[in-house]
């Protein structure tokens, strides 16, 4: 398995946002929407699942947002955004026909080719399903290349579940095992209650640890406990991939805001194998 | 599944699978198989804790009844896990409700017989208490993580 970080070739100047048009908007939850974007300048982006773009609202600011789907046509992008601050509130409020600035793609993608012929575990917590959705869509396009595909997803409450229609559709159509759990159920919820790491032991019969690639995205504490659970079940560190988030700004490893130990997560990450991250896991200052 | 004996189920259940055949046979003498339909209660808060449950298949919600709000699920337990340890500790009354969410099958042990078996065979008792402690630890860890509200609003940006 290739452990080297991939450095993205950025289209044109990496600092100049390209103009994009909002061509679709779907509300996912109370505070989260998925935007579909189309380039207004014939830019051909080769964004890979796991990479991120810098999205800017003119006059407001810029934020890093992961790719959450694959383009239906060249020059299109799909991003799922939660309103948590000034810039993201403005992004979530955009509608069809609005303009937006886009830089990227930046960073490393999920190891989809390395997972050919392997069992695949996609483990997401909260908004972490968005970057993994793009990986799952890519896997579905080439489902025959993979063995078991298991999606484990945890959210705060049923109302916070992303892509609800997709989740049931994937399971029914594509021979994918999907387990969903929530921390705080409402009275109508009949599914599992509890944290994501608890789901892993329920699917151990489905994967062969030394032939499994695990991809994880979610809050860091959730990822830490998930990694421990995967290790308990024999998945080697070099087969566990995490998507980490820090304060990405320049996107090309110059400004240093996203430094994590020896890595610039905007360039060497956000997706890294745990075998490379493990030496730094106990350094609290990071 | 329905026609399997307690002993057969104990031989494959993760909680008991690696016990010796003799130990499994001893345990089977105080066990029966029970089936629960969705919304059936395995146990109810405040009632005497007279049984110990190994969930074979299905899904069970551990919950508290909150007046004015109804049952509030705290955690779910799936096939391969265990439910109920109040029978080990005085005053042996259930602290929570456990309700089946799906059709559920369990091996149900009579607590009094199980306690007698532990007094008679301390080695078996110790092994099972260690396993139960593992289950308790996992539940405590999960409850602590839930308390952190991991998926709450992230930092502003």
Image (cartoon, grey):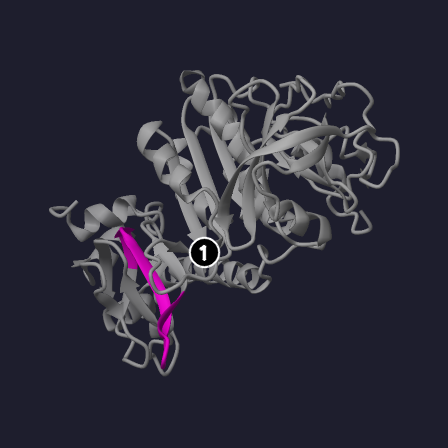
Q: Is residue B31 visible?
A: yes
> Which quadrant would the N terminus of chain A be assigned to in this image?
top right
In which quadrant of the rendered view does residue A63 lie? top right
Picture residue at 41% right of the left edge, 37% below the top:
A166
Picture residue at 56% right of the left edge, 17% below the top:
A113
Q: Secondary structure at mark 1?
A: helix
Residue A235, how many percent across, how many down? 54, 33
The boundaries of the magenta stretch are B54-73
In which quadrant of the rendered view does residue A277 lie? top right
Picture residue at 66% right of the left edge, 17% below the top:
A44
Q: In the figure, A274 relative to B84: above or below?
A: above
Label 1 resides on the chain identified as A
Q: In the figure, B101 relative to A282: above or below?
A: below
Q: Nearer the viewer, residue B99 or B26?
A: B99
Relative side of A78 to A54, left or right: left
Picture residue at 25% right of the left edge, 58% below the top:
B27
In which quadrant of the rendered view does residue B69 lie? bottom left
Q: Is residue B71 magenta?
A: yes
Relative side of B127 to A6, left or right: left
Mark 1 sits on what residue? Answer: A159
Q: Is residue B43 magenta?
A: no
């Amino acid at each position: 398995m290739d452990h080297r970080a991939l450095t993205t070739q950025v289209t044109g100047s990496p600092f100049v946002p390209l103009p994009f048009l909002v061509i679709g908007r779907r509300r996912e939850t109370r505070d989260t929407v998925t935007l579909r974007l189309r380039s207004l300048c014939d830019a051909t982006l080769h964004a890979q699942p796991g990479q991120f773009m810098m999205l800017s609202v003119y006059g407001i600011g810029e934020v890093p947002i992961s790719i959450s789907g694959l383009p239906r046509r060249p020059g299109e992008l799909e991003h799922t955004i939660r309103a948590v601050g000034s810039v993201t509130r403005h992004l979530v409020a955009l509608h069809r026909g609005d303009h937006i600035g886009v830089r990227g793609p930046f960073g490393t993608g999920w190891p989809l080719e390395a997972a050919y012929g392997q069992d695949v575990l996609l483990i997401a917590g909260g908004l972490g399903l968005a970057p993994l959705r793009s990986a799952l869509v890519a896997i579905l396009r080439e489902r025959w290349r993979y063995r078991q595909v298991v999606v484990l997803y945890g959210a705060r409450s049923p109302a916070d579940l992303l892509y609800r229609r997709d989740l049931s559709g994937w399971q029914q159509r594509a021979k994918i095992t999907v387990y969903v759990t929530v921390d705080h159920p409402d009275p109508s919820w009949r599914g599992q209650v509890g944290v994501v790491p608890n789901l892993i032991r329920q699917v151990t019969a489905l994967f062969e640890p030394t032939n499994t690639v695990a991809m994880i995205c979610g809050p860091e504490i959730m990822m830490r406990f998930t990694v421990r659970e995967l290790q308990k079940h024999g998945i080697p560190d070099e087969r566990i991939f995490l998507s980490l988030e820090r304060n990405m700004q320049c996107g090309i490893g110059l400004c240093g805001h996203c430094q994590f130990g020896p890595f610039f997560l905007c360039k060497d990450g956000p997706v890294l194998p745990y075998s490379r991250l493990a030496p730094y896991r106990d350094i609290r200052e990071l | 599944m329905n026609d399997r004996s307690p002993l057969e189920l104990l031989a494959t259940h993760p909680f008991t699978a690696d016990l010796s055949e003799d130990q499994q046979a001893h345990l089977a003498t105080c066990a029966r198989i029970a089936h629960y339909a969705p919304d059936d209660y395995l146990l109810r808060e405040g009632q005497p804790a007279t049984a110990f449950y190994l969930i074979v298949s299905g899904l069970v919600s551990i919950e508290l009844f909150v007046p004015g709000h109804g049952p509030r699920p705290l955690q779910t337990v799936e096939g391969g896990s265990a439910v109920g340890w109040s029978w080990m500790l005085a005053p042996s009354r259930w602290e929570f409700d456990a309700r089946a969410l799906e059709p559920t099958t369990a091996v149900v042990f009579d607590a009094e017989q199980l306690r007698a078996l532990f007094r008679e065979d301390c080695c078996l008792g110790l092994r099972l208490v260690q396993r139960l402690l593992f289950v308790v630890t996992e539940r405590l860890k999960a409850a602590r993580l839930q308390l952190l509200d991991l998926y709450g609003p992230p930092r502003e940006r």
